[in-house]
Amino acid sequence: MICSLFLTELFLLLSVRSWLAHGTTAPPTYEHTDPLTGTTVQCDRCPPGTFLRASCSSDTKSDCAPCPEGSFTELWNYIGHCLRCGICGRNQVVKKECSADSDRQCECKQGYFYRQDYDMCVRHSECPSGHGVLTRGTAETDTVCRICSDGTFSDISSADHNCTQHQSCGNAGMKLVLKGTIWHDNVCAKVKDGAAYLREIIPAFFIHHKIKIKRLRRIVHKLLPDDVRKQEGTSELSFSELHSRISSWVSSATPMQIRQLPAILIKMRASHAGEKLQNILNAIDKNLSKECHNGC
C-alpha cells in the first residue's frame, strides 16, 4: 500500500516535466471531478514548495499550502502532502540543506568519495610507498597515484603526499653511501659504521616490503625487550601499530642490533626481506670502505 502511494506521488511529480520543458507560463492543471456537481473541472496544480490541501470545484480554486519544515516539493503537483527531506548516509555531510522547494543534497565527507558500484562513500585510496599523489581525491573521485620519478621518493602510504626530491649529500658536506630509490632517500655519510645508515631506512623498508601481518607480528615480538614482550604482546597489533613499534626499536637499537636484523628476518622465515636488507648493508659497508681508501 505504501509503495503504491509512493509510486503514484512520483508519477504525479514527474508528469509535469514536459510542461516545464515547453516553458509554459500558465500554471499546469489536472482533471478533477467536482463531488457536488459530478462534472469534470480543470484544477491548477500547486507550485513547488507547496502541496494540495483541497482540490478546486466549479466555483473555487485549488487550495495550496506551504510545505511544513522538514518536507518539500520540487515540481508543480497535486499531491496531498509534501515529501520528507532526505537524510545523508554513512560518511556523508550536507552539501545543501533541505528547503520547501528542494530536497537536502549530500556529498561524501572529507577523505571519502562516492563509489558508484558500491553506492556509498568510501575512503580515498592511499598511494603506497614508492608512489606519490598525482591528483588528490575529491567527493566524487578517488586519489590518482603515480610512481615516483628518477631522483624522487616516498617512504609512506598517503592519500595526499607527493614524492620528495632525494637529498644532495654534497650540499651537506657528506658522501653518498647508498643511492636513493623510489621508496627511500639518499643515505649520506659522516660516520664510519654502516649500521648507522641502515638505521635511516629500516622503517621505510618495512613499509615498502609488505610482510604478511602474522609474520611481521612474530618479527616485532622477537625485537621487543623481554620485559616489554611479557607486558604488551603483539598478537593483536595492526600494521600501523607494528610499524610504530619497529620505528621505536630502530631509534634505540645499537649498531650491533641493527646489523643482526637481516639474520633475524631470515630466521623468522622472511628470507627475501632479510637477504635484501643484508645486501643493502653490504652496499653501504662497501661504499664506506671505498671512502676510507680515498682518505677516511
Image: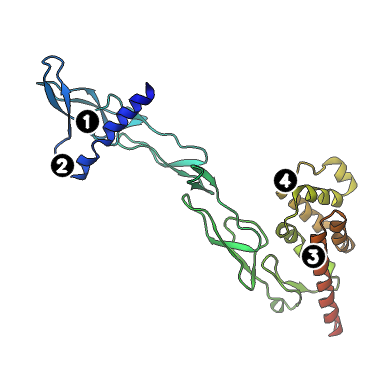
Residue tagged 3:
276
Tell me: 239 left or right of 144: right
Q: Position of residue 190 (x, y in %)?
A: 80, 74
Residue tagged 2:
24
Real-space Cα separation, disc 3 to disc 4, in angstroms: 24 Å
| 178 w.r.t. 89: above or below | below
Question: Which is nearer the eye, 35 or 171?
Answer: 35
| 34 w.r.t. 146: above or below | above
Judged by depth in the image, the label closer to the viewer, 3 or 4, is 3
Q: Position of residue 119 (x, y in %)?
A: 48, 42
User: Which numbered disc, 3 or 4, marks the residue that appears first in the sequence?
Assistant: 4
Real-space Cα separation, disc 4 to disc 1, in angstroms: 58 Å
Label 4: which secondary element: loop
Label 2: which secondary element: loop
Dot 1 amino acid type:
Cys
Mark 1, Cα crowd under 10 Å, few <14 / some 14-19 / many 20+, is: many
User: Which numbered disc, 3 or 1, marks the residue that appears first in the sequence?
Assistant: 1
Residue tagged 4:
238
Judged by depth in the image, the label closer to the viewer, 2 or 4, is 2
Q: At x 64% / y 73%, what residue is drawn?
A: 151
Tell which residue pokes out farthest to the top in this image.
36
